[in-house]
Image: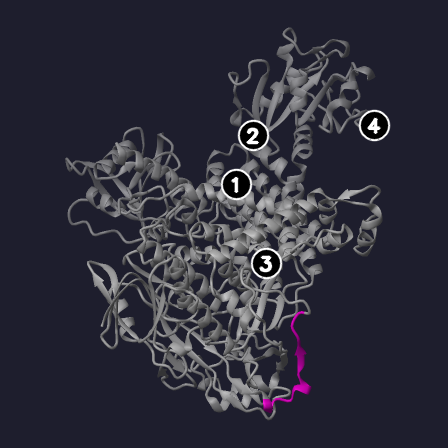
Amino acid sequence: MNLAYDVVVVGGGHAGTEAAAAAARLGARTLLITPDLSRIGEMSCNPAIGGVAKGVVAREVDALGGVMGRATDAARIQFRMLNRSKGPAVWGPRAQCDRRLYPAAVRRILDELGSLDLFQEMVADLLVDGGRVVGVRTRGGIEVCAASVVVTTGTFLRGRIHVGGDTGVDAGRAGEAPSVELAEGLEGLGLEVARFKTGTPPRVDGRTVDYARLERQDGDAHPARFASYVQEVIPEQRPCWITWAGEDLKNVVRENLGRSALYGGSISGRGPRYCPSIEDKVVRFPEAPRHQVFLEPEGLHTSELYVNGLSTSLPADVQLAFLRTLPGMEEVWMTKVGYAIEYDYFPPHQLRHTLELKEVPGLFFAGQINGTTGYEEAAGQGLVAGANAALRAKREPPFVLERDQAYIGVLIDDLVTRGVDEPYRLFTSRAEFRLLLRQDNTPRRLGPLAAARGLLTPEQAEVLEERLKEEDRVKAWFEETAISPESADPVLRVAGSSPIQEPTRAVELLRRPGITGEALARAGKMPEGGSLDGVLAAVEVDLKYEGYVERERERARHLRDQHDFKLPEGVPYREFVTLSFESREKLEKVRPESLAQAGRIPGVSPADLQNLMMEVRKWRRERSA
Amino acid sequence: MTLETIAAVATAPGEGAVALVRISGPDALAVLESLLPQGTPTPAVRVATRLSLLDPVSGSPLDTAVVTRFAAPASYTGEDVVELSVHGGWITPPLVLEACLRAGCREAEAGEFTRRAYLNGKLDLVQAEAVADVIGARNRALHAAALSQVERGLSRRIGDLRERLVGVEALLVHHLDFPEEDDPPVPLSRIVAEAAGLESDMEILLRTAPEGELLRDGAVAVLAGAPNAGKSSLYNALVGEERAIVTEEPGTTRDALEARVQLGGFPFRLVDTAGLREAEGKVEEMGIEVSRRYLSGADVILFCEDVGEPTPEGARAFLKDLDGTPVVRVSTKVDLGADSSPEGDAAGGWSCAVGVSVVSGEGLDVLRARMAELVFGGLVGVGGSVPVLTRARHSVGVRSALAEVRSFREELEGGVPVEIAATRLHSAKTALEEVLGLVTMDDVLDVVFKEFCVGK
């Protein structure tokens, strides 16, 4: 059996599904191949989507027409807006999801796409012709030709699971075979490969937990949606539960440290600092009196709980022992054992901003294979890789998001420019324009870009247009409507703001501290119309903090100027003697596409940047002469 | 690799016992070896070795030199360096340099060794600039300030301020990026207090700037007073006694006499406007011979009076327009009069008063000390505990960082959301980094992960 497609996507996780969906939305004939079709869109670790920065990415993926936002809404059993007590630029929507509903929704959304086929097989090798990738070969010997191939293998490349201090078991995920032939095939292309580790905590049976002794955490009273274009049906809601790991647990961990795969020396890969195992927490912060443990529901139709905060590579008996030290869990039964997993990744400086390999035309990588962690980070990369894979097949210009346009842009630029030395996760502090990259304005920021490139379905594009019109209307209302003192003063009094003497424009009142758009809209009797979810929030922040937002836009424009100074492929960095030795080496390794990107390489100083600009100008002159 | 090896005579030209020829770059050792007789063992690193130098082409002897090798990166420039201590004079050093150039390096441009040291991360921008100031200093105070800068005094202080900014950012990052963690949220009051502490330390540093910058240019001391009040004699006395380190620069001022002098270890540009008598500067109704232009640019004014002929009250009216410029009441010719201690209270518009005699030399030391104290008193006061900002570039950077931190704190106190006010901190950090010419790197997360237990 021989097949031919425009785009083949290897892997069906969060990166793979977004890649396949994006390629299909762009009209490319797309095939998604994965070893187990029943596990498409699987949540391998915690049953939640979003969080600070990550929630913005989920919304960005949605605004670009992607799958994640809709699947999250359809599977959501609790919603919380993190950081709500802080400023709106750092709000982070997060949803607990039903572990079975989520993949089901992903599968349903993929099935809506006409030009996408799914196929169950493990890919064993790439078809290579003259240095370019032209397709894949499965373990069963089936060859699939394709103009572009997107590889999204997650933790499966030479995956090795560790529970306790033994030598580990080869696996891509608990109970699933790793991908070894493909890892060898990729290495055979001359790519640099390295190893990371990550971990997952044990799961427990909720029927053996004494909830009365736990702290209950409910979702927000007024939950928001992740998806902007399609209204999914939202399931029933469930609480999470909080307990605390104290001295007893720390003692169990301490006594058994030697049996941990991490501390016993069987793991060499580097793990993420922001997601430390319980072993790490106990060793690195011995003074901390206690550590928070979240018990998250795995779904509506199961009593199983995910024990967030206790990721570990200790043996099963130790895991059970430390779980039973937790208040309310003295009798607990462990349903699944936590483990650490090591896997191959390919240091991402080998990629272009399109996520195509610099040295291997036609081959794209997305997700953990690039050294990232997180469903959202994977989805964002998948969408960009899939879109570019399709655009390459169609011989159209690439689709690249910039740092001032999206967290996805920050993520990919960080990967390509700075590389990674631990599994990469997004934080708001990684973005220099976080006031621009908010969770409330994703349709305005990204919708038109996506629509212009054909990344939205006609239905999505129509909803977008409606929504942007609505935002304009609400914005105009704030700018044009004067509110009388009688209507405004109650609102002002509540916020401790001084009263007004004469009718004042709503936008001016909005800029006062503590005054919300919602209160003014009520006081000024803003016509309701078909007001869409989240429209007011998007308009409010832009108006309220206009001065600050404008300052960031100004900085972003400045960066754009540097961005527009392109560094052509053949620039001989090693010959530029006015630059420090270190920067020449770094520039040679990264081969940045613009002056702005060069400036973000660690080790390249502002002085080097100045000299680089002059050297490149000189080099161009000499070359054209 | 096409990085060139450079060479230059590092000492000033002319007759001297010893001159230093410095070679830096990947071929430094090769250049040295081509000057040595065949079979000479390679000299050890960091050991002064006496060696014969030959012309690489003709083989004729050049000199006997003491040679010191440094291996990259442990050298001034961070590259391989060879230093040849040869005989001084007009012939040997250029001859040796020429031989080096023939052996395959090029002549260094002015400042190129230091530039390479900067580019290779051996010095930051403040240090690199200070090297030039140590060499070019013509007064002890600038020399001391610059030397402390070379030894990282100022860089460390600015680096500390930057570290503390990173610390505040880390508190914010923990506050913003890691809700629901083990550590309780950082109270805003702690962040406000840290910002206020940073502000006051930046202010202390900035206080050195006006005087520090004068260390490089020299403080302008203008002599004023009635005709024949003894201005020119005093000028000559102050200049003359310091002849050894005075540069008269007649070409630089067309309308007044100006000399650079070191008084009490500090640099002054002494200006005598006596020559303006006919041309302009005579403020008729006051009988004061001085150009207003000079007065407005003065850092200190020496108001001269003949001890026998006190200036009428009305003639001092101009002192009120001086906007804080210190004025020393100088009674000249005290050797001729009885009263040698004139009154110099603030009510009269004086900063202090000194009686001098250019004939006996009486009072001149006191006058010098008073001038140094009035202009550079702040620097004397901090007594080396605070590094001195000697360039406008330094104070511009620190001042803009201060303004940003202040706005940050005020906005935070005024209820502006944290992440919005935080944009100020980024600008403040950039301003300090620009002073140091630093690589900008996001090391905030490193601090967060060290300080807080993050991860659920």
Callout 2 crowding tier (Cα within 10 Å): few <14, some 14–19, many ≥20: some
Subunit of mark 4?
Answer: B
Q: Secondary structure at mark 3?
A: helix
Q: Earlier in the sequence, mark 3 or mark 1?
A: 1
Q: Is residue B27 magenta?
A: no
Q: Quadrant of the N terminus of chain A?
A: bottom left
Magenta range is: A207-220
Sequence order check, earlier mark of 1 and 4: 1
Specify whether residue B391 is in view: no
Discs 3, 1 touching: Cβ within 8 Å: no
The 10 Å Cα crowd at callout 4, few under 14, some 14 to 19, many 20 or more, is few
Q: Which residue is mark 2?
A: B217
What element does badge 4 sit on?
A: helix
Place of residue A135 in the rendered image (x, y in percent of width and height, measured from the top left)? 26, 64
Label 2, label 3: how far apart the Cα atoms are? 37 Å
Q: Amino acid at mark 4?
A: Ala
Judged left or right of residue A46, residue B20 is left
Q: Position of residue B60 (x, y in %)?
A: 16, 36
Reply above or below: A471 against A184. above
Q: Secondary structure at mark 2?
A: helix
Q: Which residue bears the numbered disc 1? A: B146
User: What's the residue type where badge 2 is placed?
Assistant: Asp
Quarter assignment of residue B168? bottom right
Chain where mark 3 sits: B
Residue B15: name its quadrant.
Answer: top left
Residue B138 at x, y percent in the picture: 52, 32
Give the residue number, with chain letter if any, for mark 3: B167
Q: Which residue is mark 4?
A: B347
- Vertical order, A167 against B421 (above or below): below
Q: Please, which chain is the residue tagged with disc 1 on?
A: B
Question: In this view, which residue lies farthest toward the bottom?
Answer: A331
Amino acid identity at mark 1: Ala
